[in-house]
Amino acid sequence: NLKMAQTTFSGPVNLGAFTVATAPTDASAGSIAYFSNGAAGSPVLAFYNGTDWLRVDTLAAISAS
């Protein structure tokens, strides 16, 4: 049986900060990062699906414009 790990944070979590141009290509699927310009130039959280970084608000790929 696979057991799921759970982590509880008692304060803010500092995610890695990137731009679309510096998006990691060696991330593991399920990774989450903050992109300062990933929502057509505006900040957004995104997750890596193993191929693309997808915005959590729209599920579209991150884009600087």
Image: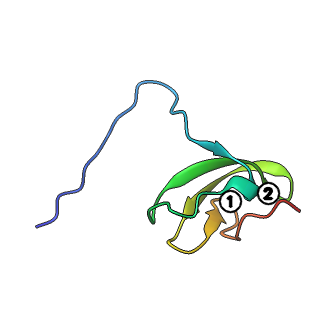
Examine the rendered structure and indicate whether residue 52 appears above or below residue 39: below
Residue at the spot of label 1:
57
2 or 1: mark nearer the eye: 2
Q: Amino acid at mark 2?
A: Ala
Q: Measured from the top left, where is residue 41 in percent x and y? A: 86, 53
Q: Earlier in the sequence, mark 2 or mark 1?
A: 2
Residue at far top of view: 11
Can you tell which mark lies on residue 39? 2
10 sits to left or right of 7: right
Crowd class of label 2 (few under 14; some 14 to 19; many from 20; radius 10 Å): many
Quadrant housing the C terminus:
bottom right
Q: Nearer the viewer, residue 56 or 52?
A: 52
Q: Residue at x 32, y 40 (%)?
A: 7
Res. 64 image quadrant: bottom right
Name the colouring of the figure.
Answer: rainbow
Q: Measured from the top left, where is residue 56 in percent x and y? A: 63, 59
Is the residue under label 1 in contact with that under label 2 (CB below 8 Å)?
A: yes
Q: Residue at x 48, y 56 (%)?
A: 31
Q: Residue at x 49, y 60 (%)?
A: 27
Residue at far bottom of view: 51
| SS under mark 2 | strand
Q: CA distance from mark 2 to mark 1?
A: 9 Å
Crowd class of label 1 (few under 14; some 14 to 19; many from 20; radius 10 Å): few
Res. 2 image quadrant: bottom left
Q: Measured from the top left, where is residue 30 in percent x and y? A: 45, 62
| SS under mark 1 | loop
